[in-house]
Amino acid sequence: MEFGQPYYLLLILILPLLVLWYFKKGQNQEATIRFSNLDLISESVIRNGKMKNMFFIIGRLFIMLLIIFALARPRLSDTIRESKTEIVDILLVIDQSSSMLAQDFKPNRLEAAKEVAKKFIKDREGDRLGLIVFAGEPYIQCPLTRDINVLLEFTDEIEIIDQEHDGTAIGMAIANSINRLRESDTKSKTIILLSDGSNNQGELDPITAAGLAAKFDIKIYTVAAGTHGLAPYPVTDAWGRQVIQKVQVDVDEESLKEIAIITGGQFFRATDNKSLLKVYEDIDALERTEIEVKEYQNYTELYSWFTIPAAFASIFFLFFSRGIFHKLF
């Protein structure tokens, strides 16, 4: 409960002063009838008179208190919020080629990408997200959905592709993503493409695919994953043992930058886990839509809860003071 005119509550401070004034006035007043001997008046009469006097004082204070509360306009408020936000359709496109086993990210590039992707997914509640993986060819891992838990499960299931289907088909991955997004009725359609290599598979080159994405107003953020120079990579030696060798990092930055420029997105380079996390946080901030919130206050006035009891109490004390109840009963 709140008060529409709370300053009237200050009048409550006057009530104790009125009580003091009343008692002081009563002490200074002389009685209209004098008795030479108080023994002529029974103690019960005196006691009843004092009780009646106190009853009237408390009654008047109660009525004034009710009136003060009524003047302060007590009310119940109910806030109604209307929010309007645009849904963003986002496809996470993740490279699952064998080069993602490189250990310049911990424990390797693919696992680091999965962990960052899962955090990104959790932070995009309300949007529709999907997941596409690619190596020599793209695969739909999870279609667009608002079910975060399902998407997280599919993200956990991403593994390095077998050698038979290895490769990097960036152009075909973009084309597959376009097919998933082109019929979307949302205003914002976004692809986040993460790769650590250069296009060496598929029938469609990445730049042509980017042009197609631009025609459908699909924005592509490209992320090049991999350190500069050499990166540790697990290989199997002649005796079947797994050893770590340094391999050259071969990321086609120029193509990834061009894809981002053509589609109105941005290019990012991640060289370790920390920078990869920062990249996805930046993209998350860039793809936030404005939320329009309208608030309405609905008030229920409660002054009648105080005015009606005050009216009945006033009538009661008026009748009581004139002895009407005594005459009736």
Image: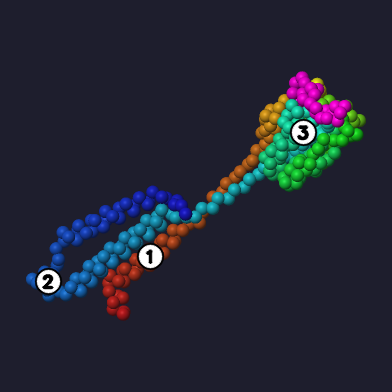
Question: Which image quarter is the C terminus in?
Answer: bottom left
Disc 2 element: helix
In the picture, the disc for residue 66 is none
Q: Does the magenta stretch include residue 53?
A: no
Q: In the rendered structure, which disc, 2 or 1, sits on the residue that comes first in sequence?
A: 2
Magenta span: chief secondary structure: strand
What type is the residue that disc 2 sits on? Leu
Q: Is residue 76 left or right of residue 100?
A: left
Q: Residue at x 16, y 59 (%)?
A: 28
Distance between mark 2 and mark 3 Cα atoms = 105 Å
Cβ atoms at labels 2 and 1 below 8 Å apart: no
Applied colour scheme: rainbow
Q: Position of residue 12 (x, y in %)?
A: 34, 53
Q: Is residue 250 above or below residue 79?
A: above
Q: Is residue 285 above or below residue 328?
A: above
Near-viewer residue (325 or 268): 268
Q: Mark 1 points at which residue?
A: 311
What type is the residue that disc 3 sits on? Leu
In the picture, the disc for residue 38 is 2
Distance between mark 2 and mark 1 Cα atoms = 39 Å
Say if residue 283 shows up in the picture. no
Distance between mark 3 and mark 1 Cα atoms = 78 Å
Say if residue 295 shows up in the picture. yes
What type is the residue that disc 1 sits on? Ala
Q: In the rendered structure, which disc, 3 or 1, sits on the residue that comes first in sequence?
A: 3
Find the magenta span and give its range.
Answer: 225-247
Q: Which of marks 2 and 3 is in front?
A: 3
Q: Position of residue 148 (x, y in %)?
A: 72, 45
In the displayed image of the protein, which residue is found farthest to the top? 229
Q: Where is residue 115 in the image (x, y as percent from the top left)?
A: 72, 37
